[in-house]
Structure formats: C-alpha cells, structure tokens
Amino acid sequence: MNSKSLQSQADGIPFFKFLNLEVVSTTDKATTCIMPATQRLIGNSYLGNIHGGIIASCMEATASLAVFDRPRKGAPKPINLTVNYLRPAKMNPLHCRAKVIRAGRRIAFVETIAWQVDEDTPVAKGQFQFLLI
Amino acid sequence: MVDEQTSLKVDEILSLWRQRSGFHGEMKAKIIEADKNSVLLRMPFNSDFCADTEKELIHGGVLTALIDSALGLSTMLAVPGLKTLATLDMRGEYLRPAKSRSDLMVFAECYRVSRHISFNRGRVWFDGEERNQVAVGYATFALTRGPKLQVFNARENSCEQ
C-alpha cells in the first residue's frame, strides 16, 4: 500500500481525523506520520506541552497503520502498549515512525519513536502489540 | 473519608482540574468521586474518538489518554506540595473491544508515592458494566515538589504559538 491510499484509509477513521494525522511515507517495514500540535491537544497548558496520552495515541495510530493491511479482514486489534516518555513535547509538529519488528499469522510487534527536533532526540518511544485476526 | 485540611486541598485541585482546556476540555470528563489518592471520572461518548466508520468503537488511544489524565489527577490528590509532574512511563492493556456508545468510567489510584516518583493504576469500563473492564493502565510520574501547583493554566491562551 502506498502512502496516498494509506492516507485515505486513515481519513476514514474519525479519531485519526481528530488528530489530523498525515501519512508521510510507508513501506512493508516502517510507516511515518506527522501530527500538527493544535490547541485541543494540549495536556499541560501551564508549560505548553502536548498531552502525554495524545503522544501515545499518535504512536498507536502510526503503529496500527504500519500493519493496517495485514489482517485478512477488519483492522488490526490493539492488545497492549508500553510507552516511555523521554522529554516534554512542545507545541510543534510531532513526527512518528513505526517499525514492524515481527508480524506473524496472529500477532504483530511494532516499535515506535516520536520526535520533534530530530530523530536522535526522541520525545517518546513505544512498543505495541496487535492481534491480526 | 478525607480530613478537613485534605478536603480543602482536594476541592482546590478539583476546581482547577475542571477548568482545564486542551485535550482535557475535549474529553469532557466529569469527576464523580475523589478521595485522598483516587478518583472516579465519567467521560461521555464522542463520535470523534471512534476507530470505525459506524462510530461505535472507541479508539484505544482515547482510553490511554483518559487513563493518563485520570492517573495524573490521582497523583495530584495523593502528593501534598506538588509543583509539577511528568509522565515517565505508561502501560496499557486492551481487554476487549471498546464497543458501546455508553459513557466511559475510569477509576484511577495512586498506590505508592516516593520522594521523586509516584506509581499509579487505573481501569476503564462502560457505565453499568464494571465487571467487564475494557482496559487497564499503569503509569509512573516524576514529581517536582514546590510551593505552588503549576499544572493548570496560569492564564487563558498562555501557550499560544
């Protein structure tokens, strides 16, 4: 699937529209998305940071798009997630790349990284598991 | 029950929490109960938060964001003299599809506070279905202690770009 058709899939999902998630690139191994920082995604308005839960949501959305066409029918079903928050996310666009570590017949393991300035100074890293049946 | 001094602090925190904007405003979560280290919230159904075109399945990311917020509030209630808190780590398990248009309930508690770290756990279910939990979550927060809580808006639009 190319990034244009993946984008049209993403646009069909109300919550991805809410996040204004944009697919930048996609291959079999990795998918990259970008999410603009809007006022309604603020977590700590005293410090002006993106909500931590939204960072996890953006990573989960990117991770699910990375394995979007793997199930024979329906969408990948999230099983669990672990997120490490490494730095505060300022009110700037959030980049997120999801790498498919292993996708078997039933389970997919996806690792994500989210950054703002550059990939070497990540805001958060995450691990996600999806059920593909 | 909470003692009088704690109760004043609880009211102050809850009143400030209710005025939060950003994603908290979008979730429209209401505080149903609050204690010295725990909180029960109710979030109304919102079709913008759905993962399907039929608009009846809540996206997992929303559950994570809701748990994260509720766990943060339980730490604010549990730690006297808190200045700021930062999420270090969040773990969630999706126990079943979140398929319903009922209100979501979330219970969050802070079960251990050390000098620098708080440990929190929470669970989510659809109203009336507490036995069938939809998700559970755990988070740790890094605590900064100080005289004034700096988690809420100092003023409106204080963070406009």
Image (tube, coloured by chain):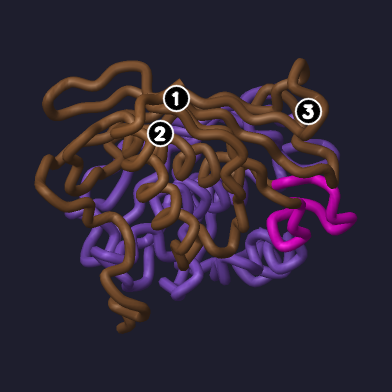
Describe the element under mark 1 as helix, strand or loop: strand
Report which residue position mark 3 lands on.
A133
Chain for disc number 2: B
Report which residue position mark 1 lands on.
B109
Give the residue type that dot 2 points to.
Ser
In the image, residue B49 lies in the stretch drawn in magenta: yes
Determine the residue positioned at 48% across, 39% down. B70
Chain with colour brown in the figure:
B
Q: Looking at the picture, how far across and down is residue A75, in whole percent?
A: 76, 43
Determine the residue positioned at 29% across, 34% down. B5
Give the residue type that dot 3 points to.
Ile
Q: Which residues are magenta?
A: B45-58
The residues tagged by marks 3 and 2 sit, at their Cα atoms, a distance apart of 36 Å
Q: Quadrant of the C terminus of chain A?
A: top right
Report which residue position mark 2 lands on.
B74
Chain for disc number 1: B
Residue found at the far bottom of this picture? B161
Front residue (pair B7, A129): B7
In the image, residue B46 lies in the stretch drawn in magenta: yes
Query: Dot 1 surroundings within 10 Å: few (below 14), some, or many (20 or more)?
Result: many
Chain with colour purple in the figure:
A
Q: Looking at the picture, how far across and down is residue B116, in whole percent?
A: 14, 29
